[in-house]
Amino acid sequence: MKKIKYFLLTKTIGFGLNFKGYFQPAKAAAKAYQLFSEPRRGQLTEGNLPEMLQNVPTQVFAVGEHYFKTYVWQGNSNVILLVHGWESNTSRWEKLLPYLQQTGSTIVALDAPGHGLSGGKEFNVIKYASYIDVAVKAYKPNVLIGHSIGGAACIYHQSHFGTDNLEKMVILGAPSEFQNILKNYVQLLSLNKRMKKHLESHFSKKFDLEINSFSSSTFAQKIKISGLIIHDIDDKIVAFDEGQKIANSWNNSAFIETKGLGHSLHSEEIYQKIIRFISS
C-alpha cells in the first residue's frame, strides 16, 4: 500500500510540474530543483538522538547563513573525518565507529546540510563540499571516509579544494555521473522532455557548469592521494559501474567489489579492510 501511495504521489507531482512547465518554465524548474535537493529523511532533534550520539562532544560551525554540527570521539593526533550520504546522518557510522576507534584515532563526523542537527534545507554536492572544507580546516584530518553522495562530495572537495594534511580517502558506494542521478529523478516523476530540459538548464545556471561535466570519475583524475573505493555488485541505489568508473580514473586507488551487502556496505570484513588500508 505504501509503495502504491508513493507511486501515485510522485506521478501526481510530475504531472503538475509538466503542466506548469508549459506556462511558467522557470518556476517549474525551480520547484523541481527544490524537491530534488530537500531531504525528506535524515533530520534529528536534540530530543531524539540515537544512543551513539548522546553525551558526545559536539561543535557547531557557521557557513554563510547556515550552520552544521560535528561530533568528536577524541583519540590521538591521527584524525578521521566521516561524511555520510543522502537522507542520513552521523548515526549511520554506528557499526564502523568501534573499529575505527581501535586504531586510537580521533574520529570526527559531520551532519550534512539539512541532515541530522545541521541547518538549512538545500543539499547538493558542491554545498556539502564547502561544509567538508570548513571541517577539514578545523580538524586537519589524515583520512576522509565518505558514503554514497558523501563519497562524491569528498571527491569533489579534494579535487577542487585539496589539503596538504589529507593522506587517504575511503569511498563507499558513491555515484560518479550526476547525469545519471538526474535521469533517475526525471524517470521517478515521469517528467517530459520539455521539463527535463528546463531542469537541466536550471542546474547549469545555478552551478555554472554543464551537466555532463559534473562527474566524480572526472574529478578523481586530479586526486593524488591514496584511495580505497568499495562498491557492491548488488547495490540498487547506485549502480556498480559507477564505482568502477571512479576507480578506473583514480590512478592511486584500489577497488574492492563486494556482493550481497547492498548500498549500506556494512560487514566486519569490510570494516577490517578499511582499517588495514588507513593503518598501512
Image (tube, rainbow, N blue to C red):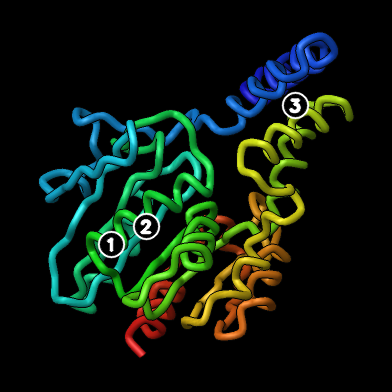
Read off the residue under disc 3: 189
Q: Amino acid at mark 3?
A: Leu
- Observer-side mark, 1 or 3, equals 1
Which x, y percent locates residue 44?
31, 32
Q: Residue at x 13, y 64 (%)?
A: 74
Do the CB atoms of the residues marked 1 and 3 lie less than 8 Å apart? no
Label 2: how many residues lie within 10 Å, few (<14), some (14-19) or many (20+)? some
Q: Is residue 52 visible from the viewing direction of this image?
A: yes
Q: Position of residue 153 (x, y in %)?
A: 50, 56
Could you tell me how far apart the alpha carbons at marks 2 and 3 are, in whole angstroms? Answer: 33 Å
Q: Distance between the Cα atoms at labels 1 and 3?
A: 39 Å
Tag 2–tag 1 contact (CB < 8 Å): yes
Q: CA distance from mark 2 to mark 1?
A: 6 Å
Q: Which residue is mark 1?
A: 137
Q: Using the rendered view, name the quadrant where residue 67 is placed.
A: top left
Q: Is residue 202 left or right of residue 272?
A: right
Q: Residues within 10 Å of mark 1 (few under 14, many from 20)?
A: few
- What is the secondary structure assignment of the residue under circle 2? helix
- Residue flagged by tag 2: what amino acid is it? Asp
Q: Secondary structure under badge 3?
A: helix
- Left or right, residue 99 beside residue 261: left
| Nearer-N-terminus badge (1/3) | 1
> What x and y, as percent, mark residue 124?
53, 42
Residue named by callout 2: 133
